[in-house]
Image (cartoon, rainbow, N blue to C red):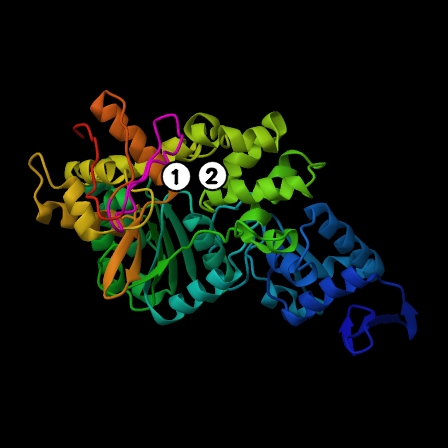
Amino acid sequence: MIKIGRVDVSLELRKLFLNGQPMRLGTRAFDILEVLIEASGQLVTKEDLFSAVWPDTIVEESNLQVHISALRKLLGPDKDLIKTIPGRGYCLIRGRQSEQATSPLWSEANPPESGLAPNPFPLCCAPLIGRQQALEDVRGAIDVSPLVTLVGTGGIGKTQLALEAARSIASRFAEVRYVDLSAIEHPDSILSTIYDGLAHPPEGGASLRARRQLVVLDNCEHVIHEAASLCERLIQSNPDIKIVATSREPLRASFERIYRVLLLEVPRQAADHEEVLRCSAVQMFISRARAREPDFLADGESLDLIGVICRRLDGLPLALELAAARVTTLGIGELVTQLDNRFFVLTGGLRTAPARQRSLKATLDWSYQLLCSRERIVLRRISVFHERFRLGEACRIAARDGLTEDDVIEAIAGLASKSLLTVGACGSAMSYALLENVRAYALQMLDEASGSDMTVNRHGPGAGAGGRSMAGAQTDTTVPDDQQMSLAIPDG
């Protein structure tokens, strides 16, 4: 028996007892209680509960709240032993004496007796979906490395994953800090100020060397050199520090361990409805749509169309969230039709979000502006490849008008590092591809750079060249494989 306040719980019998008398509790509510018990007083996120209790079903957060309320009602005077961690989840305190020791959060209004600083990490406004394994991987990386950099394309969810990982281990540290670098305009002076603040606390505080610190450095890509230098200085100053950084490319700093954040899983084109519902991209889309419209239905034809949306948007969380926001006004069918015009349609992000996260185009603009001129030119030119391509094919397309093959090779490496190209093995060589969102953006940039329409025919053995007109319609013109690639490409 496990005692929770005055109530005894038998996990074997799946029953609760009060003064020896059995108490009635629904199956789902007992499943939730079992997960909370097994967590031994640690935080259980809402996503963890959804995965454990409803593994193959998408449910509203209100369902979880109903079952939590039922549990608290049964506990009666001991209902406060189930703690709500706002925006994150729940934890179960077995007994009053252990409450402070096992609570995973610090409250500014009631700090722990040890004098540890409160947790400063900003709350995430939506559950973390499809990232449980990633969360475990990041925590494992933090255990073995002083610097873990979460790398991925814009809008993939690096910040939320970093914050969830940091929150889950915050209780191990004497001090935790969150620093958002996105607003920095003069990196040299401001990063020095950040370092000074971390390394030299106010008079009377403990020194950096005497503290176990956890620091999250968010959005490092536009100050990448200074961020790398900062991390090295912090680690050299304090062997007990742990740094979690987010960036669209690796810092390439000493001590760094890179974790590449993947896109959410999208369904196969021929997937049945059960398989569609199991995909994390679909789960996220439905979750966000229901947050806007609680009566949103996902069945039958709608599921097929949701699968199309998730594939067309590459399983990119930001794009899915923006698309879900349009469902209530456009409907699923019209939304699919409008994806060829995605940069006009996928807007309307949270008003409180940074400008680069309020539309799909804005987040790609942010990445594009961070490229050097050579990388921008090559990105525009390789946008004519609809399928995977090899390095030689990229050189044949892009090495002209002052760009050498060496320039193209260097640019391809830079684009891959900055999460704008996907890289895969192709025999003994490597092949490359643009995500559909990135390719659509690069085609638009090519059109703007050229000032004229562009027509791309698919030619050549293994070239994978194809294209869309600027309106988004894919050409289907083909020629025999023994013909050479022939592309009408304007300057740019």
State yes or no: residue 474 in magenta: yes
Prevalent SS, magenta region: loop
Residue range of the region highlighted in magenta in the rendering: 460-480
Q: Mark 1: which amino acid?
A: Asn
Q: Pointers 1 and 2 in contact (CB under 8 A)?
A: yes
User: For this rendering, which residue is in front, 98 or 53?
Assistant: 53
Decide: few, some or many residues near mark 1? Use Cα within 10 Å; few <14, some 14-19, many ≥20: many
Residue pointed to by mark 2: 319
Indicate left or right for 212 with 291 as reference: left
Q: Mark 2: which amino acid?
A: Ala
The x, y position of residue 416, in whole percent, is 26, 51
Residue pointed to by mark 1: 437
Q: Which residue does the image show at 44% across and 45% down from the upper left?
A: 314
Disc nearer the start of the sequence (1/2): 2
Vertical arrangement, residue 117 with respect to residue 31, above or below: above
The x, y position of residue 321, in whole percent, is 52, 39
Mark 1–mark 2 Cα distance, whole angstroms, equals 9 Å
The x, y position of residue 43, in whole percent, is 60, 61
Q: Nearer the viewer, mark 1 or mark 2?
A: 1
Q: Which residue does the image show at 29% across and 41% down from the upper left?
A: 479
Mark yes or no: residue 184 visible.
no
Under circle 2, the secondary element is: helix
Vertical arrangement, residue 206 with respect to residue 473, above or below: below
Vertical arrangement, residue 83 with respect to residue 464, above or below: below
* Number of numbered tags placed on the structure image: 2
Q: Which residue does the image show at 27% across and 38% down from the upper left?
A: 384
